[in-house]
Image (cartoon, helix red, strand yellow):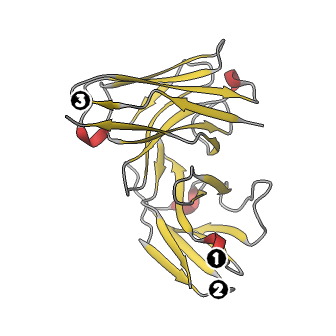
Amino acid sequence: EVQLLESGGNLVQPGGSLRLSCAASGFTFSIYGMSWVRQAPGKGLEWVSSISGGGVSTYYADSVKGRFTISRDNSKSTLYLQMNSLRAEDTAVFYCAKYSTESTSHYFDSWGQGTLVTVSS
Amino acid sequence: SYEMTQPLSVSVALGQTARITCGGNNIGSKNVHWYQQKPGQAPVLVIYRNSNRPSGIPERFSGSSSGNTATLSISRAQAGDEADYYCQVWDSSTVFGGGTKLTVL
């Protein structure tokens, strides 16, 4: 059974940093693309960032480009999101999601339960 | 960047068929995927590549896509189908529609 367990969400001040982690199990982590998707309170889903299975290719939404960095450690089956220069509008539940293939051009077949990031002074 | 338009809300009578649309420029040429999200829960894939159901998703859920509109249909709607539904495509990046709240009356 595929399991994705996010952690690292917290309350942080504007301008601060946070690193999210997603521990994966139940599948061969290294051969699947992974992504972070966020959902602001009462709003819809917003794609944030993706990374290919091998970690060679990374992609970012314009809203986070230059501030967020996605990475993965395939030896630990863990996905990361380093978030810097956080803004109030980054407040959201962040979901870790698994693509159906190695690339990031397909659909998400599994999602974690999410971790809440709150940016506020 | 590619944009998709979904109605904010759709209502359906119990036992009838709900249809949720997702509009986008020539969306019929893309693979459209649909997710169901119930309050406080993570999204769940209900349709992939326009019309395919993952294992465990009832046959009541079906999808189609042509021209500028993709449609998720839910036949014999049940109270348990009440949720937000999102379409998703890939167009140089992953893109979600704005979401539709389905109410079963």
Which circle marks residue B79 in the picture? Answer: 1
Q: Chain of mark 3?
A: A
Q: Chain of mark 2?
A: B
Sequence-first disc among 1 and 2? 2
Q: Could you tell me how far apart the alpha carbons at marks 1 and 2 are, in whole angstroms?
A: 7 Å
Name the quadrant of the N terminus of chain A: top right
Q: In the figure, residue A34 lies in which quadrant?
A: top right
Q: Are marks 1 and 2 in contact (CB under 8 Å)?
A: yes
- In the displayed orientation, state which residue is furthest to the top: A75
Q: Secondary structure at mark 3?
A: loop
Question: In the rendering, at what x and y percent does residue A11 appear?
Answer: 33, 32
- The lab-note entry on whether marks 1 and 2 share a chain reads yes
Q: Amino acid at mark 1?
A: Ala
Question: In the rendering, at what x and y percent does residue B60 appear?
Answer: 74, 72
Q: Which residue is mark 3?
A: A13
Which circle marks residue B90 in the picture? Answer: none
As displayed, is residue A75 above or below residue B75?
A: above
Question: In the rendering, at what x and y percent does residue B24 appear?
Answer: 45, 62
Using residue A52 as the reference point, say whether residue A46 is left or right of it. Answer: left
The local crowd at label 1, few if under 14, some if 14 to 19, many if 20 or more residues have their Cα within 10 Å, is: few
Which residue sits at x=42%, y=60%?
B98
- The lab-note entry on whether marks 1 and 3 share a chain reads no
Q: Chain of mark 1?
A: B
Q: Which residue is mark 2?
A: B14
Which residue sits at x=57%, y=62%?
B28
Q: Secondary structure at mark 1?
A: helix
